[in-house]
Amino acid sequence: MSSDSTAATVIGKVFLVGAGPGDPGLITVRGAECLAQADLVLYDGLVNPLLLRLTRGICERTARARQTDVAIVAQADINARLIHEAKAGRTVVRLKGGDPYIFGRGSEEAAALREAGILFEVIPGVTAATGAGEYAGFSFTHREISSSVAFVTGHEDPSRKETRLNYRALAAFPGTLVFYMGLGRLKEICENLQVAGMAKSVPAAVVCHVSLPSQKVVEGTLETLPALAAAQNLKPPSLIVIGECVKQRAQLSWFENLPLFGVSIGVTRPEEQAEDVAQRIVRKGGEPVMMPMIEVGPVNQHHQTEIARVVRQLGRFHWLVFTSVNGVAEFFRHLRDAKLDTRCLGNAKIAAIGPSTAERLQDFGISADVVPPEYRAESLAKAMEKQVRGKTVLWVRASRGRDVLPRMLTDVGALFAQLVVYENRDVETLSPDVECRLKSGTLDWIGLSSPSIARHFAKLLKTSGITPNDLKTRIATISPVTSAAARESGLTVAQEATVYTWDGILQAIERARS
């Protein structure tokens, strides 16, 4: 048998992965491993899209319920797709909100895979009820309150004429009741429990959008909850919690007290640099909205030739200056391509514009000799000026940048050279989602982290037909220089960082909320 025919018989594997209730940090380690090795990810409508950053595979959304602009995909079609892709030799992740089996249809998918002879693995996830309780401030079991908890579906098979739920047994249940998918039947559920004997004064709550910045909790009693929830115009996904544990919320609630809870923030960094900022926003309870203004790419052939020449002569430089994490990564990539390492730097001293750049240098075993107190070119030049007179200085940089460093250091007698190791290219348009949110005012803040990003954002606004006066989104900048560029472009700056990093931008937004 030929190698081609042997390869054609290779059958892939399907991983049924629980994505958790919403917060991307709640994916399991094993779930993240599966995403990293996937060729194809079929994810359902409740999955946080931020999780898709963990995979390089093709990602396709499925939806089992009617949603705007998203077609319903029948369960049988999903099963067939999983089988087809695995038979084609692909590694497939079926990414499901919460846990694959608890009120999901993962077991149906597993049964179909087994019948088709497809290898599969099930990766449990944090189910929505667990997330709802602990992110909203309810401990479903407590030695002084409840020794048991029951998970109940609030959305039964619509083809059944009679309910399978025994409301008399549920009303007598000695613990906490948690109903999944019951928002549309909230009034009916509460009334049925009262008719079956549960006291109307029993505490009850609805939790929507569990563990997300849009999480909302409405508290009441079995009698009052339906009217209270209706007045708040709640939207699914949601859970209904019934029991004495609801009273704990005043003491145990923590998620909604995070400093950026409920705040959406546009992250304008290049995709390659956005992950750490997104994680910081999520950990503070906010929603990161990716809207890169520039793309980072390889240099052209002219610069490639210059890099090949200069890296062979690095020993002649007294100083190397790095002004971005991308510059560090690309510089050392070019060294590797030339089969060189840090030994070729000789006794050169190293300057970094800020702590993020210095930390990236540490990844390559390099400790920066100079990091200025203010993380901008003017401060870096001042920190170096007494040490570089008559010295050769190499600035490792992007294809675009301010001329502050060469001007200030040349003025004090440095022999200045520049090496372009990567290119910055402007993003041509705003994404449809970001444009829609800017026009509707549903994006709270945008962080602008450089003068060029500020100017380009203003340009993209104009292209999208949005004037600065129409912009309801507030702007936070990383530095006075960036603020000046934003204002020159017609933008209004609401907050300015006092520490010139993305952490400083987030701190400025926090100050505006306090």
Image (cartoon, rainbow, N blue to C red):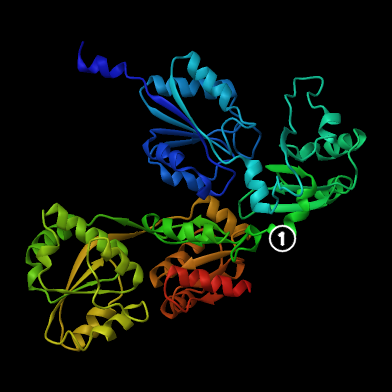
Relative to 383, is 230 above or below? above
Q: Position of residue 29 (x, y in %)?
A: 44, 43
Residue sitting at 58 percent across and 46 percent down?
A: 22
Mark 1 neighbour density, 10 Å: few (under 14) some (14–19) many (20 or more): few
Q: Position of residue 212 (x, y in %)?
A: 61, 52
Would residue 347 be seen by someone viewing this image from the given angle?
A: yes
> Which residue is more in the foreground, 234 or 256?
256
Q: Name the kind of residue labelled 1 in the image.
A: Gln
Residue at which label 1 appears: 251
Residue sitting at 57 percent across and 41 percent down?
A: 126
For this view, does 166 lie left or right of residue 52? right
> Which residue is more in the foreground, 400 or 462?
400
Total number of numbered labels?
1
Q: Position of residue 503 (x, y in %)?
A: 46, 69
For this view, does 400 lie left or right of residue 58? left
Asked which quadrant contains residue 148, the reply is: top right
Tell me the quarter of the image containing the N terminus.
top left
Relative to 391, is 359 above or below? above
Asked which quadrant contains residue 403, the reply is: bottom left
Residue at the farthest front position: 143
For this view, does 207 lie left or right of residue 32? right
Residue sitting at 31 percent across and 78 percent down?
A: 377
For this view, does 352 lie left or right of residue 136? left
Would residue 209 be seen by someone viewing this image from the given angle?
A: no
SS under mark 1: helix
